[in-house]
Image (tube, rainbow, N blue to C red):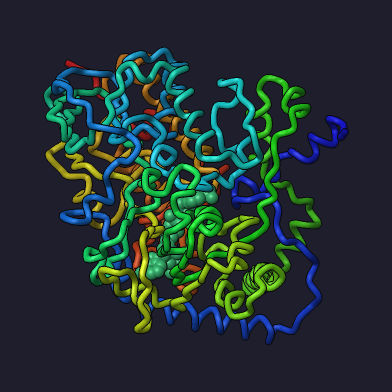
């Protein structure tokens, strides 16, 4: 049996884990190669990218997320049951969250610590959980280590069951947080906010919903997630398909069976090979009579290396273990003077070249792993990603590649073109008809630039979308001038971390501290000053576009499908540690960054 010291070493937080998902990588020292080798691969990367950009010049307009008419069925909630009738709500709360996922849960926990009682979650689903409510497809899991991803483990006195938590464990954790912090009491489910309007006389937000409610709130927090609205590729004839179909975030277990056993006599197709499809395909391959995977661009698949949590390690954990683990990986590496001098002596071009070469080495190890696992050479070649690591969301799976060795699993590689036609029998590619019983869309989610879906009208009747028409304007991605007491979570101009809950937790702490500051100082409302907002916009711009990677990357939602993008309409790239420090600075100098309003 391993000692606790050995177990601790195994579980020690890897500083990369919060930054890049997955823990174990195909690492190996490379034999030196001539630069011409790397240049040839870079040329191939560029060719593959151009091919894809040319196939979809319409950029993000190739997708739709407004599911009207016959497409509206793709939004139906298969998990929530009948919409429960209720009378319209016309009341006032202190804090209202639009959305009930981790953003709302984490911030609520912090608000409760400050003694705030009147908290309402308004959520279109039938429960809390956000992403983890909707995404229940077979194989769903998070590939950021659970000990970091699952938030509030110290507070909840909970140790995750595995290194990578499955969707149902994460969903149950969300529900447990809502129970512990008493968030169900005022929560309103199966309800969508349609308008959020600032009333300057009352200095309150007025919110309307699709259920006829008219609620008022002093503080509103946009907690509706960045990847929460499913999108479909606009494919000619898709409405005519006569078989069964759904989006991965609305999995129809009535049709497939909970264990997918109802697929044994079914021919199934899946469009897309992103992170969702990579997790769903092994189960589909093991259960469907035939499975057709329609691929446009392969994902990079590295080792997953999952394990069950060792009970001895879990038992030995001392209170506050998650906070200490987080503090350990948040430490920025300290370079010695010699190391700093050596780093400074290398030119910028040389640094970029070295980075690119090691990135290519990594991608070639991903290729090699495919060759080692996938027996059919044509299939193996088609599964090889030809782009720099991190151009697309990296994936980690130990069963995905072996699935292609099954006789019933067929990879239909569209080599960048994608499926462009569907008829009543199923997809058609290069004149060949694929006749299906079930078609699954694993085509992802709209990336909403502002993270805002309802109409938000601030001071002077200005719609937030109009306010952002020349580019997003915020302080730390959270506050916008003219929108007092409105806080935006998980949107742009905030830092990016793969461990999203880390960002949300940090933002939640900041928002709760702001609200607490208002309450303690007798202020009714706070509004960021235009100067502070402008300062942050310039901070964001100054940290973007350090490299040309976005232009060189294969298109996808990471780079707005290759479209032009304003430099301020993106993440703050100055680093997570600096982002936290900037938020703390804003809180320390509240009077410089915000104006405060007392109620008459
Ligand atoms: P993605 O947007 O990543 O993937 C959409 C897929 O659909 C891509 O493979 C895309 O191809 C493909 N596609 C679109 N149109 C067509 C077409 N006409 N024909 C064929 N293929 C098409 O969505 P996902 O739901 O997979 O993932 C979204 C995000 O959710 C992830 O990036 C990740 O951040 C998160 N996630 C995390 C998980 C985890 O922790 N493991 C698991 C699941 C999701 P192309 O690449 O060419 O555009």
Residue depicted at 33% across the width and 52% down the height:
230
Q: Quarter containing ligand 1?
A: bottom left
* Whether residue 227 is visible: no
| Quarter occupied by residue 64 | bottom left
Seen in the image, is 146 located left or right of residue 598?
right
Q: Is 253 in front, or is 353?
A: 253
Camera-side residue of 245 and 537? 245
User: Where, by quadrant of the figure, is residue 160 drawn?
Assistant: top right
Question: Closest to the observer: 201 or 2?
Answer: 2
* Residue 315 as seen in the image, left or right of residue 508: right
Of residue 328 and residue 87, the one placed in the foreground of this image is 87
In the image, residue 88 lies at what x, y percent? 14, 23
Position of residue 196 measured from the top left corner of the image (x, y, whole percent): 19, 35
Where 93 falls versus 249 (above or below)?
Answer: above
Quadrant assignment, res 452: top left
Q: Which residue is drawn at 17% across and 44% down?
A: 463
Q: Residue at x 48, y 23 (%)?
A: 176
- Across and down, in percent, residue 344 comes to 70, 63
The residue that appears at 51% across and 70% down in the rendered structure is 410
Q: In which quarter of the image is the N terminus?
A: top right
């Amino acid at each position: 049996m391993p000692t606790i010291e050995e177990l601790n070493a195994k579980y020690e937080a890897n500083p990369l884990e919060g930054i890049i998902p997955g823990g174990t990588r195909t690492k190996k020292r490379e034999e030196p190669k001539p630069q011409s080798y790397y240049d040839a691969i870079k040329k191939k990367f560029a060719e593959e990218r151009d091919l894809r950009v040319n196939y979809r010049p319409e950029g993000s307009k190739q997708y739709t997320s407004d599911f009207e008419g016959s497409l509206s069925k793709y939004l139906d909630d298969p998990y929530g049951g009948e919409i429960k009738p209720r009378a319209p709500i016309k009341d006032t709360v202190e804090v209202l969250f639009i959305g009930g996922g981790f953003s709302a849960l984490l911030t609520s926990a912090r608000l409760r610590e400050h003694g705030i009682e009147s908290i309402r979650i308004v959520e279109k689903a039938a429960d809390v959980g956000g992403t983890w409510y909707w995404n229940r497809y077979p194989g769903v899991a998070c590939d950021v280590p659970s000990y970091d991803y699952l938030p509030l483990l110290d507070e909840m006195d909970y140790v995750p069951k595995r290194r990578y938590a499955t969707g149902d464990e994460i969903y149950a954790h969300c529900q447990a947080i809502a129970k512990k912090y008493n968030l169900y009491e005022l929560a309103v489910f199966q309800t969508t906010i349609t308008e959020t309007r600032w009333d300057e006389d009352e200095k309150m937000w007025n919110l309307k919903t699709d259920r006829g409610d008219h609620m008022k709130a002093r503080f509103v927090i946009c907690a509706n997630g960045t990847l929460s609205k499913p999108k479909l590729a606009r494919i000619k004839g898709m409405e005519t398909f006569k078989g069964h179909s759904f989006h991965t975030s609305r999995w129809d277990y009535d049709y497939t069976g909970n264990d997918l056993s109802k697929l044994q006599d079914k021919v199934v197709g899946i469009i897309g090979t992103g992170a969702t499809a990579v997790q769903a395909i092994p189960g589909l391959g093991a259960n469907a009579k035939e499975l057709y995977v329609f691929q446009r661009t392969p994902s990079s698949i590295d080792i997953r290396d999952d394990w069950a949590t060792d009970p001895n390690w879990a038992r030995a954990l001392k209170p506050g273990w998650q906070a200490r683990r987080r503090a350990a990986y948040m430490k920025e590496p300290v370079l010695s003077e010699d190391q700093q001098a050596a780093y400074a002596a290398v030119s910028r071009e040389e640094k970029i070249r070295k980075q690119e070469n090691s990135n290519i080495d990594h991608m070639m190890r991903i290729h090699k792993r495919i060759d080692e696992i996938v027996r059919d050479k044509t299939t193996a070649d088609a599964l090889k990603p030809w782009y720099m690591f991190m151009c697309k969301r990296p994936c980690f799976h130990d069963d995905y590649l072996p699935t292609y060795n099954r006789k019933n699993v067929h990879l239909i590689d569209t080599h960048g073109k994608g499926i462009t036609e569907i008829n009543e029998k199923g997809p058609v590619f290069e004149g060949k008809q694929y006749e299906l019983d079930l078609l699954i869309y694993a085509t992802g989610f709209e990336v909403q630039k502002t993270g805002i879906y309802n109409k938000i009208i601030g001071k002077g009747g200005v719609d937030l979308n109009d306010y952002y028409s020349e580019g997003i304007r915020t302080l730390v991605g959270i506050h916008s001038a003219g929108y007092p007491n409105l806080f935006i979570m998980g949107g742009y101009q905030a830092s990016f971390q793969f461990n999203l809950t880390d960002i949300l937790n940090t933002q939640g702490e900041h928002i709760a501290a702001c609200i607490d500051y208002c309450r303690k100082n007798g202020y009714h409302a706070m509004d960021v000053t235009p100067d502070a907002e402008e300062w942050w916009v310039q901070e964001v711009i100054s940290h973007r576009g350090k490299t040309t990677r976005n232009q060189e990357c294969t298109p996808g939602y990471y780079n707005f499908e290759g479209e032009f993008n304003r430099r301020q309409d993106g993440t703050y790239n100055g680093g997570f540690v600096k982002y936290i420090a900037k938020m703390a600075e804003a809180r320390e100098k509240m009077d410089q960054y915000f104006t405060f309003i007392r109620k008459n």
